[in-house]
Amino acid sequence: MTGAKIDLEALKKELGEGPMRFAPHGERPIEEQIKSLTEEEKKCFDELKKKWEAKEDRSHSFSDEMILRFARCSPGKTKFNVKTAWKVMNKYNAHYLELTAGGLEKQLLTKTLFVVPGLKSKEGHDVFYMRPSRYFPKQTTVKEIIDNLAYCMQVMVEKEKACTEGIAFFANMADWSMSNFGINYCHQFMMMLQGRVPVRVRLFLIVNPPGWFGTIWKIMKPMLAPDFRKKVHMISADKLEDFFDKDSLQYLPDEFEGGKVSTEDIAKDFVAYRKKVEG
């Protein structure tokens, strides 16, 4: 959607203020973003594009927007790394290219995992949110929750800043119990956060974990690369100001003490906006 021209005024009249919280503002077309790359960055982009188009066994194509994402979000200390970006491209599940809000509507409306408009980390990263207590392995498949995750992350990096600088994630552990946990689900989720889609997660907050969460952390920790572990923080809700932009805390979901924004409305508005722009 980055490269598509959206008539924001027309959408606002049709959808109203709520869904328009998710609309992009001031986004440059992909063509302009590519033209502004440095010589070295453009070389990486061109090489990835050439390698993919020459790949004989490829079952799908990637748009210039997706190739730019792979280059910008190449795993490791530096961006625009052909070797690491190529590895992600080869392992990328093309199924994620087909995800839509319409297809995921039922899952998105469970309010288990969604983007929080307006909320920013202290570093200015956009934020997505999860309420793990709403996920029950016996009721929802691992595929459904992973598709939910992939979709939200990919929507977020349609924005140039998020694609270039990364995003933040926080999990509200209120009411969470072992009935909401599964090792396969946990493993798949952690792998997604670490590079199965072209996204850089810069911050991972686990908020209000139960006192016995250390047992779960022992299972999770080996699933995380050493560098990624440094991004994980287990905190109480009163420490959110240490990680989020103070002014943006007004956009916290109302499931948190002091949160003012309807969680129900966030989920509904997100689906309404995305269904409209995706046709």
Image (cartoon, rainbow, N blue to C red):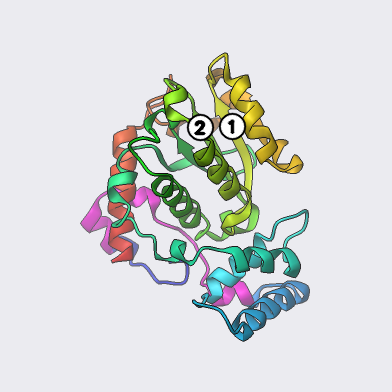
Residue on which disc 2 sits:
171
Q: Is residue 242 visible?
A: no
Dot 2: few (<14), some (14–19), or many (≥20) neighbours within 10 Å? Answer: many
Q: Position of residue 52 (x, y in %)?
A: 62, 79
Q: Are marks 2 and 1 in contact (CB under 8 Å)?
A: yes
Task: Determine whether, in the image, residue 3 is placed left or right of residue 11.
Answer: right
Task: Give, as a single range, the part of the protein colored magenta.
Answer: 10-34
Q: Secondary structure at mark 1?
A: strand
Task: Determine whether, in the image, residue 253 is placed left or right of residue 189.
Answer: left
Please tell me the numbered disc located at residue 9: none
Write down the quadrant of residue 100 in the picture: bottom left
Dot 1: few (<14), some (14–19), or many (≥20) neighbours within 10 Å? Answer: some
* 228 drawn magenta: no
Q: Is residue 187 visible?
A: yes
* 19 drawn magenta: yes
Q: Quadrant of the C terminus?
A: bottom left
Write down the quadrant of residue 236 in the picture: top right
Say which amino acid is labelled 2.
Answer: Ala
Task: Determine whether, in the image, residue 193 is placed left or right of residue 257.
Answer: right
Say which amino acid is labelled 1.
Answer: Leu
Q: Nearer the viewer, residue 192 or 215?
A: 215
Q: How many marks?
A: 2
Q: Earlier in the sequence, mark 2 or mark 1?
A: 2
Residue at 34% x, 33% y is 263
Please tell me the numbered disc located at residue 205: 1
Q: Quadrant of the N terminus?
A: bottom left
Q: Nearer the viewer, residue 217 or 44?
A: 217
Q: Main secondary structure of the magenta part?
A: helix
Q: Position of residue 225 (x, y in %)?
A: 72, 43
Residue at 59% x, 59% y is 198
